[in-house]
Image (tube, rainbow, N blue to C red):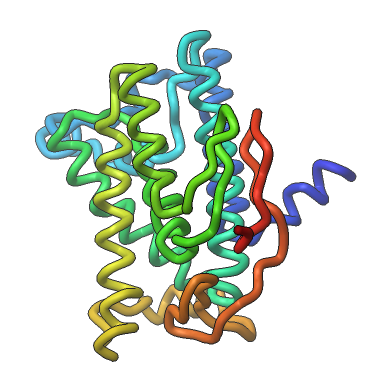
Amino acid sequence: MDLENFLLGMPVVTRYWFLASTIVPLLGRFGFIQMQYMFLQWELVINKFQFWRPLTALIYYPVTPQTGFHWLMMCYFLYNYSKTLERETFRGRSADYLFMLIFNWFFCVGLCMALEIYFLLEPMVISVLYVWCQVNKDTIVSFWFGMRFPARYLPWVLWGFNAILRGGGTNELVGIFVGHAYFFVALKYPDEYGVDLISTPEFLHRLIPDEDGGIHGQDGDIRGPRQQPRGGHHWPGGAGARLGGN
């Protein structure tokens, strides 16, 4: 019952993305799925016509003793920020949130193939986190070692930590770029100039009908009325700050 409540507590799009991104890597970890069929590569997609790879690369992650903790962190970020963004920022409009994920996925696929990034989970999660941070840019978040700063800096802090600790950072930069592209095109530009550059296709609204609600921004009006924060924001291993706290 606790597991059922946990899953049903997530909005519909986040729920299925979270389940796929946890179950599929675990199946791979225990040998039920072979990684060779899951990763993204330009030659295999374009020249070998293996068109499933952009989808499998989204939900698969190679879980090993070396990568397991990082995968768990990505799952936490997915659960926390995707759930909050869908439930609060896109409240009642899961079809619009699904379109955001499709938009981000499309650009992540192109960039990751060009940069030879084989798995999409990390840049996709960072792109969602970036959008949340822009909508809630003045929210104070607590990071490891007692660090506190406005949410707008969080993606860059993650990039810096990853660059130092793991010698990476490209995944984070791709996610930041893609998240900024969506935020500017879908939220910031229409909010400032009153012109919609993109819109959710009607078939997605038929797939997931809208409920009462709208698009809300905590730190400013993002195409909708202001929404008050509903709870706390916590990092694993560090104290959390209430949304909107000072």
Name the residue: 25% across, 45% down: 109
Q: Is residue 148 left or right of residue 127?
A: right
Q: Position of residue 56 (x, y in %)?
A: 39, 37
Q: Residue furthest right?
A: 1
- Number of residue marks: 0
Q: Position of residue 15 (x, y in %)?
A: 62, 52
Q: Is residue 5 left or right of residue 185?
A: right
- Compared with 14, 188 (above or below) is below
Q: Closer to the camera, 225 or 242?
A: 242
Residue 132 can be seen in this image? yes
Q: Position of residue 61 (x, y in %)?
A: 44, 27
Q: Quadrant of the N terminus?
A: top right
Name the residue: 46% across, 81% down: 221
Q: Is residue 216 left or right of residue 34?
A: right
- Compared with 122, 153 (above or below) is below
- Compared with 244, 25 (above or below) is above
Name the residue: 45% across, 66% down: 135
The image quadrant of residue 18 is: top right
Q: Closer to the camera, 146 or 101?
A: 146
The image quadrant of residue 167 is: top left
Q: Residue furthest top?
A: 65
Q: Is residue 149 left or right of residue 12?
A: left
Name the residue: 30% across, 42% down: 54
Q: Residue furthest bottom?
A: 194
Q: Position of residue 146 (x, y in %)?
A: 59, 33
- Compared with 236, 90 (above or below) is below
Q: Quadrant of the C terminus?
A: bottom right
Residue 56 can be seen in this image? no
